Image (tube, grey):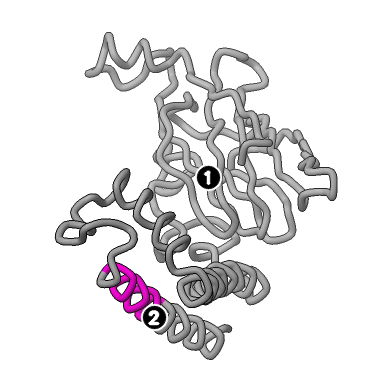
């Protein structure tokens, strides 16, 4: 999305890890953990986490598509032993549907959340969740959301909503419908003005697919006209069949 201009964040901890890879943690009583983001909503979102007590302890910045998860980001320092009151400031951004003028409204939310008790007493990876209702939350766990020992209240990976699945399906339908219209237009031109249609195709083939015109004398070659008509008819048949199947299988 070109309208989204996000600045990546790179925690200073990475330098420490590169210099002392065998150390358990760079700060006294803390350990570095990876960060993940999971999006249970139908809106693209991004997140940044920051230690309210240490602005250099920061991570995140990736963009996560609807009903999906992000990658593994490094790193964020957490206390090696859990105690009540460990806080993380989470800043989430999501975008509303594009307006008629092409702008993409951005919504920014910042909240401070407490890191829940570690699973098995071990500092786990940090998971930043945007729940289905839009709420931002944090989970500390080396287990993934679909694992039986996952401690988060939201269980499992995101499941796309019916509305979202249909919207993505409709994009594919419109794309294939465009292919049908294109082949129909090309065939009409080859019937009404074959020399003109063949000339345009010939120039394009010379630039992109010269091997496709080997054996023809030029754009006015009647054999080349027949070749184009046959190719367009085959393309129309494929696109028409795929469009029919997409419409029949739409959720």
Magenta range? 224-235
Which image quadrant: the C terminus? Answer: bottom right
Q: Of helix, strand and loop, which mostly describes the magenta segment? A: helix
Q: Earlier in the sequence, mark 1 or mark 2?
A: 1
Please tell me which residue is depicted at 42% across the width and 60% down the height of the picture.
149
Instruction: Verify whether residue 230 appears in magenta.
Output: yes
124 on left or right of 115: left
Instruction: Verify whether residue 1 appears in magenta.
Output: no
Q: Position of residue 238 (x, y in %)?
A: 39, 80
Local secondary structure at mark 2: helix
Task: Name the residue furthest bottom.
Answer: 248
Local secondary structure at mark 1: strand
Q: Position of residue 103 (x, y in %)?
A: 79, 40
Q: Evaluate whether residue 168 shows in this view.
A: yes
Alpha carbons under labels 1 and 2: distance apart: 47 Å
Q: Which residue is mark 2?
A: 233
Please tell me whether residue 108 is drawn above or below residue 30 in the rendered image: below
Q: Position of residue 48 (x, y in %)?
A: 61, 31
Q: Residues within 10 Å of mark 2 (few under 14, many from 20)?
A: some
Q: Which residue is mark 1?
A: 37
Please tell me whether residue 118 is drawn above or below residue 188 in the rendered image: above
Please tell me which residue is depicted at 26% across the width and 51% down the height of the picture.
209
Task: Name the residue furthest right.
Answer: 100
The mark found on residue 85 in the picture is none
């Amino acid at each position: 999305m070109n309208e989204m201009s996000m600045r990546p964040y790179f925690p200073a901890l990475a330098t420490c890890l590169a210099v002392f890879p065998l150390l358990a943690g760079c700060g006294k009583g803390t350990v570095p953990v990876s960060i993940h983001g999971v999006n249970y909503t139908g809106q693209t979102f991004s997140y940044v986490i920051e230690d309210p007590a240490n602005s250099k302890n920061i991570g995140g910045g990736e963009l996560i598509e609807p009903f999906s998860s992000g990658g593994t980001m490094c790193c964020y320092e957490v206390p090696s032993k859990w105690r009540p009151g460990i806080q993380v400031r989470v800043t989430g951004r999501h975008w509303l549907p594009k307006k008629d003028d092409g702008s993409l409204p951005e919504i920014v939310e910042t909240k401070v959340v407490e890191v829940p008790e570690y699973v098995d007493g071990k500092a786990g990876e940090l998971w930043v969740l945007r729940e289905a209702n839009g709420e931002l939350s944090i989970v500390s766990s080396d287990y993934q959301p679909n694992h039986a020992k996952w401690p988060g209240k939201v269980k499992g990976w995101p499941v796309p909503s019916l509305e979202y699945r249909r919207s993505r399906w409709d994009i594919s339908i419109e794309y294939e419908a465009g292919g049908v219209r294109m082949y129909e237009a090309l065939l009409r031109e080859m019937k009404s003005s074959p020399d003109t249609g063949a000339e345009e195709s010939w120039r394009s083939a010379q630039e992109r697919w010269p091997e496709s015109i080997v054996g023809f004398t030029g754009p006015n070659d009647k054999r080349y006209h027949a070749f184009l008509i046959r190719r367009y008819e085959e393309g129309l048949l494929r696109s028409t069949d795929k469009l029919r199947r997409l419409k029949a299988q739409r959720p």
